[in-house]
Image (spheres, helix red, strand yellow):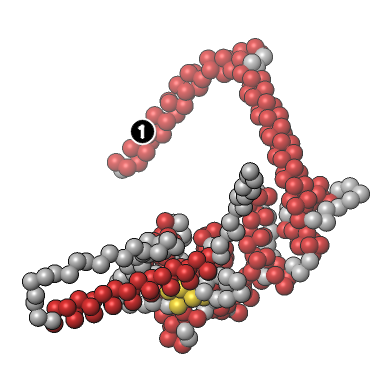
Amino acid sequence: MVCPRRTIPVNPPVPDLATVVANLQRQLLEQQQETNRLREQIAQMNQRPQVDEVPPPVHQAPPAYQVPPVVPPVPEVQPEIPRNAEIPMAPVGGQVNVQPVREDLLYERFRRMKAPEFEGPTDPIAADNWLIDIQVILDFMRLTEQEKVLCASFALRKDARHWWMTVQMRRDVLAMDWQDFVTEFRAMYYNAQILTAQQDEFTSLQQGSMTVIEAVQKFEQLARLCPELVPTEREKVRRMMKMFRTDISKQVSAGSSPPTLVSDCVSRAIRAEYWINRDKEARAQIFKARKEEKAVVKQTQPRQSSESNQKGQTSGPAQNSKQFGRNKRKGNFSAACGSS
């Protein structure tokens, strides 16, 4: 007796997703056709005259390969939005996927970030700081270029809002990218007259009574507005050394290797300022101690000076009585002259 050969089960190949979807669509189409055919038969049977005998229902078993019918999902009906822009999203597989932007949802996400508002000051430093802060938030949200423009326009208030309305009148803001927004923003708040004033302030900037950290912050703000004045790292270090006070710049440049990087220059200036302040505090304490010592010496004067003061005080009443008599005689004489 020959035993039947045992077949080793082989894992079926993984079906292709596109093939599965195509099969399901084909089966769904066949089911719809079968349903239409049954409806036509029922309609024909209803048109026939009624008879007493009712034919038994025909039961047809589905084929073995047939899968349960797939019910297509009901599309979600979204409310209409007054401003609905189509913005290209990130490319997938070399194709651009265009999806509508829900401005209400986008604004809600942006509002939760608590972005700073901009009212349109004339100070370019404040405008530059706002532009940097808003760009950090937009990059964190991972928005498209056009969505960045929409969110940035949400944060404009007062004069800045009026300026943005003029931009909307002369160009299509929905087609603007972030670089276009930055160009328009700088053209408005970084005009030539303001930049000239900032350049003059940058060239004449001095530390004065500011600390090193405060002076460096002011220097960096002006340097961002005047990049043509500090084209290289060496030129930036040179201007920063010129800005510091003389006592600090001397200690920073002392030694065989002067600083060539801004970070090195700033760290040296902070250390120099620390030791200069320590020296000033030590001198102030010495001066205070000497002043207190002089006060103690004045309180403990020799006895001779105290005795001489006492003698002067004892002779004081006699002299006072003599002076009183003189004043009395002068008063009588003046009274007699007045009566005559």
Place of residue 97 in the rendered image (x, y in percent of width and height, measured from the top left): 52, 74
Q: Nearer the viewer, residue 170 or 204?
A: 170
| Residue 308 appears in the rendering | no
| Tally of numbered discs | 1
Q: Residue lying at the far right in this picture: please name it.
A: 256
Kindly state the secondary structure of the residue where label 1 is placed: helix
Residue drawn 71% across and 32% down? 282
Q: Nearer the viewer, residue 261 or 16?
A: 16
The quadrant in which the N terminus is found is top right
Tell me if mark 1 has few (under 14), some (14-19) or many (20+) residues whose alpha carbon lies within 10 angstroms of its own: few
The quadrant in which the C terminus is found is top left
Write down the quadrant of residue 160 in the picture: bottom left
Q: Nearer the viewer, residue 133 or 289?
A: 133
Residue drawn 46% across and 73% down? 99
Q: Vertical placement of 336 versus 315: above or below?
A: below
Identify the residue position indicated by label 1 in the image: 332
